[in-house]
Amino acid sequence: MLQVAFIRNNKDQVIKKLKKRNFNADSIVDQVLKIDEQRRSLQTQLDKTLAESNSLSKEIGSLFKSGEKEKANILKEKTTHLKETSKTLSEDLNTKTNELNSLLHTIPNVPNELVPSGIAEDDNEVVFKEGSIPDLNENALPHWDLAKKYDIIDFELGNKITGAGFPVYKGKGASLQRALISYFLDKNTAAGYTEYQLPYLVNEASGFGTGQLPDKEGQMYHITEDNLYLIPTAEVPGTNIFRGDLLNENDLPITITGYTPCFRREAGSYGAHVRGLNRLHQFDKVEIIRIEHPDNSYKALDGMVDHVKDILKELELPYRILRLCGGDLGFTSALTYDFEVYSTAQERWLEISSISNFESFQSNRLKLRFKSNDGKKQLAHTLNGSALALPRVLAGILENCQTPEGIAIPEVLVPYTGFKIID
């Protein structure tokens, strides 16, 4: 959520930069500033009324002590009127504050200057490519056929147990999943991230804090009886560890990694592009999260990008990095880099990671601040990224590493799997 003071002091820049998202903010920004002016006026009146009431209360006490009961009773009548006035002002102030917050919740984050203009994913900017696309034989298969051939993933069984989008991993398929999770966690902890085991359910306040609510409410699985939500990513419980906290500058940076299953309704997702592992309702992901000093957050973002590049290099998968355009940028993000692995059998790029800097957008919602060494309190910056999301990494390994003899396991994973080939 953007800070009102930031909007007030940078009105023209906010409107201009949000146009890069194809978001016309002229009207809503004017509304925000108008309501904020009314809110501040009410706050001033309330503060003045309360101060006068407190002053009179002290004077009344003194009058009673000195025996001037008649004067004291006259002032008591005045304080009664002031209390009624302050109650009305307080109610009006709460109404305006709620009205203001409702408007602020509809405004997305202001994009960083590096974000390219554009409407949709076709306008994203390719900033890096690495790895050679393997030349597969003419009998090469997509991962869903390979999964059936080697009996390692059963999509039909998952459909029987739960429904489409809930695959069952079997035998060496399950072992490869576990190997990837362990490898990702080991890479992350070796890079200085502290491992956490996080809840898979969060409350409404947590969903709001990181921006999934109300923006993506329809995409989250909701347990209505308990008003809890299944997490769409470990970003939600991981970042909410610090909701409402006042940290010290010396605590920063805070770095977290965690493995969780992720649950997404993916409403409206149909067609060949979501076949197999390409899009699921339940999938596994290892996340990295950082709480940073504002001065260091973009350097940290570059470090996260380099970290994921190193993982993909070790997996020997061809990949590219995209800088998302304004029209494809997530609601809470100021700048996002997407990693995509090339699926040779499908002849298309598959997204496997998003790494984002939210600047102070999430921390303002979370009320996550830190006290600098000079005593000043300010909002921290939050960042997160996938390192990595498993389904499409697994799809990339199955398709790009297929040979006539079977699926060759990337060398870096062999110590984790205990086998070199799926045959």
Image: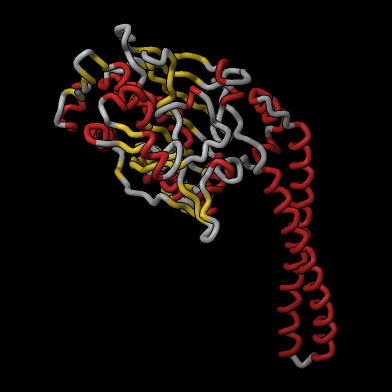
Q: Is residue 4 left or right of residue 229?
A: right
**Image point 78% across, 37% down: which residue?**
30
The residue closer to the viewer here, 236 or 420, is 420
Identify the image quadrant of residue 164.
top left
Q: In which quarter of the image is the N terminus?
A: top right
**Image point 32% across, 6% down: which residue?**
138
Q: Is residue 377 left or right of residue 278?
A: right
Residue 405 visible in the current orientation:
yes
Residue 377 visible in the current orientation:
no
Identify the image quadrant of residue 387.
top left
At which x and y percent is residue 233? 44, 41
Count of marks overlaid on the render: 0
At which x and y percent is residue 357? 48, 32
At which x and y percent is residue 416? 18, 32
The residue closer to the viewer here, 243 or 218, is 218
Q: Is residue 87 above or below residue 219?
A: below
Q: In this view, does 250 lie above or below 111?
A: below
The residue closer to the viewer here, 52 or 229, is 229
Colouring of the image? secondary structure
At which x and y percent is residue 17? 65, 25
Q: In this view, does 138 lie above or below 236?
A: above
Q: Quadrant of the C terminus?
A: top left
The residue closer to the viewer here, 82 or 117, is 117
**Image point 61% across, 24% down: which residue?**
327
